[in-house]
Structures are given as C-alpha cells and as structure tokens.
Image (cartoon, rainbow, N blue to C red):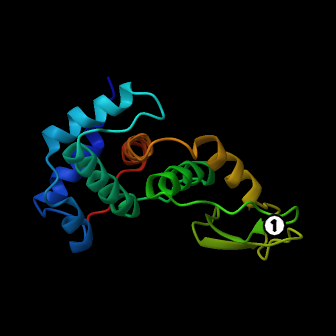
C-alpha cells in the first residue's frame, strides 16, 4: 500500500484555499481525494505498461498529476539534481513528450544555487569545459545523455503509471522539504 498522505494534505489545503497561490489552488479544484487514493493504489499495483480503462479514473489521475506539477513548485527547498531528474523523466512520459537523442558532446548548461557557510547564496554557472564562476571548486552538470538514458528506460510506461510515479515522487519531496505558504 502506497502512502501519499503528505501529497493529499497539500491537495486538501489547496482545495480549501488555506495556502498556496491561486494557480495551485485552481489546479487542486475538482479532484476527488477519496477517488484519487483508490486510483493511485490501483495504478501502483499495475504493471508499467497497463493503462487505465476507465476514462473518469484516467482524468482524475491526470488532474492530480497536473496539480503535483504545480505543488512541487511550492517546496520550501529546491530538490537535488537527482530528484529533479526523476521528476523530469516522469513528467516527460506523463505528458507524452519525446526526448531528442543528444549528440556526443551535448551538455545541458545548468545554474546551481548554493548556500555558502557564511549563509549567503552563491550561484555557479556550469558550461562545457566546467569552470565554475564562483569561489568554489564544486562543479556539476547534468548531461543530456544521462537524462535521455533515464527517460529511455521509462518512455514506454503508460501515462497512468508515469502520473502515479510522478505524484509519488512529489509526495516524497513534500514529506522531505515541506511547502511554502504563499
């Protein structure tokens, strides 16, 4: 049995308009929480390639997926790069997006915010060649090849399974980081 209590608490709070932005509250509107629990469990027990036959169930899960995509932006702390990778690939599959296979030297440029020991935020901009533009010896890149490889492993999952996995991952992040009130 999968426990998505933190996600459901955020959903209910947004539906009651007690917290979050109007955009998040709007995304929460009309999602039947009791039905979502049952659908989430059903899909969690299914294989990766099984589809939801019931259109109402599929629509409820899709709406919850769309809400999760808004709710994840309300985390108190930005998830780590590996956590973002999982969100990214499940989101792509859930939306039905296809990734282009990267070339041999194709590296995604990234910007990473860090909090130095002084408490002041620092930003490092990474690019091909790997020279950080701050006083850190830290360097990180997410290679498109890594993203593509991760996506390729799950690209054939059903939309319902991708939605369920995305919601489950957002649930874990909500439990880990909490959400902002705004």
- Where disc 1 sits, the SS reads loop
Answer yes or no: is residue 3 visible.
no
The x and y percentages for residue 31 are 17, 52
The image shows residue 82, relative to residue 72, as above or below, that is above
The x and y percentages for residue 27 are 24, 64
Q: Nearer the viewer, residue 136 or 51?
A: 51
The image shows residue 70, relative to residue 171, as above or below, that is below
Residue under the point 37% across and 43% down = 171
Horizontally, residue 68 falls left or right of residue 86, namely: left
The image shows residue 39, relative to residue 56, as above or below, that is above
Numbered-mark total = 1
Q: Nearer the viewer, residue 107 or 113?
A: 107
The residue positioned farthest toward the left in the image shown? 16
The residue positioned farthest toward the front in the image shown? 53
Quarter of the rendering containing residue 42: top left
Residue under the point 41% across and 33% down = 50
Answer yes or no: is residue 12 visible.
yes
The residue identified by callout 1 is 106
Quarter of the rendering containing residue 180: bottom left
The C terminus appears in which quarter of the rendering? bottom left
**Mark 1 burial class by Cα count in 10 Å: few <14, some 14-19, many 20+:** few
Residue under the point 25% across and 72% down = 23
Quarter of the rendering containing residue 40: top left
Horizontally, residue 41 falls left or right of residue 47, namely: left
């Amino acid at each position: 049995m999968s426990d998505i209590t933190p996600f459901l608490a955020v959903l209910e709070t947004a539906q009651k308009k007690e917290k979050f932005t109007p955009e998040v509250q709007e995304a929460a509107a009309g999602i039947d929480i009791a039905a979502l629990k049952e659908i989430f469990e059903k899909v969690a027990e299914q294989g990766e390639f099984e589809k939801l036959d019931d259109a109402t169930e599929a629509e409820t899960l899709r709406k919850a997926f769309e809400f999760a995509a808004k709710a994840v932006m309300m985390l108190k702390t930005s998830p780590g790069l590996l956590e973002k990778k999982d969100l990214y690939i499940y989101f792509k599959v859930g939306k039905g997006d296809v990734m282009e296979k990267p070339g041999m030297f194709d590296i995604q440029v990234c910007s990473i915010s860090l909090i130095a020991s002084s408490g002041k935020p620092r930003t490092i901009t990474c690019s091909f060649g790997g020279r950080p533009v701050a006083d850190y010896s830290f360097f990180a890149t997410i290679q498109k090849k890594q993203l593509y490889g991760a996506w390729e492993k799950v690209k054939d999952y059903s939309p319902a399974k991708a939605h369920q996995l995305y919601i489950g991952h957002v649930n874990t992040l909500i439990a880990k980081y909490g959400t902002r009130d705004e």
